[in-house]
Amino acid sequence: MSASATETGVPGRRVLVTGSRAPVALELARLFAADGATVFAADSEPALASRSRAVTRAYRVPSARFRPEEYRAAVAGIVSRHGIDLVVPTCAVVFWLAGGGGAGTAGSSGGTGGEG
């Protein structure tokens, strides 16, 4: 059983969901919005969540896999511009945001790169 957003302090917050082409990103956007969050989405490809009424604004960002520095800068810009309280990375983009590269071993070009 999961905690509701009310218990975790999400209502009234601004949330950025990255890797928004993933079906889980759409579900997260809907859940956050239903609990009172303002939801933003970002991905390097056309994204499923971008078209949702739960998303206030969607952004196309550089590929995390092929342009990681530009990707991190774009996400940081969105966070700054909208006063984002919580960034929720989906797929392997968490590795790119952390600065460590993609899924798998360092320098790996395999795996599911998420945004890119």
Image (tube, rainbow, N blue to C red):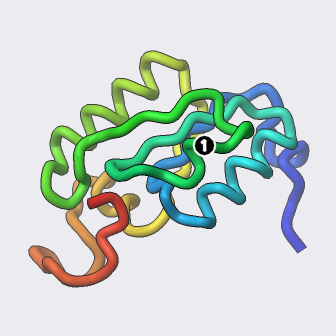
- Residue at 73%, 39% in the rendered image: 54
Q: Is residue 43 left or right of residue 111?
A: right
Q: Is residue 58 above or below residue 51?
A: above
Q: Which residue is nearer to you in this view: 20 or 6? A: 20
Residue pictured at 86% horizontal, 41% vertical:
35
Instruction: Report the label total.
Output: 1
SS for dot 1:
helix
Quadrant of residue 110 within the rendered picture: bottom left
- Horizontally, residue 51 falls left or right of residue 42, namely right
* 73 versus 46 height, above or below: above
Location of mark 1 (residue): 51
Work out which quarter of the rendered image holds the N terminus and state it: bottom right
Q: Quadrant of the C terminus?
A: bottom left
Q: Residue furthest top?
A: 81
Tell me if 31 is positioned left or right of 79 in this view: right
Q: Give the x, y percent position of residue 68.
A: 18, 50
Q: Residue at x 84, y 47 (%)?
A: 5
Residue 62 position, x and y percent, is 24, 43
Q: Residue 8: x percent and y percent?
A: 80, 47
Q: Amino acid at mark 1?
A: Arg
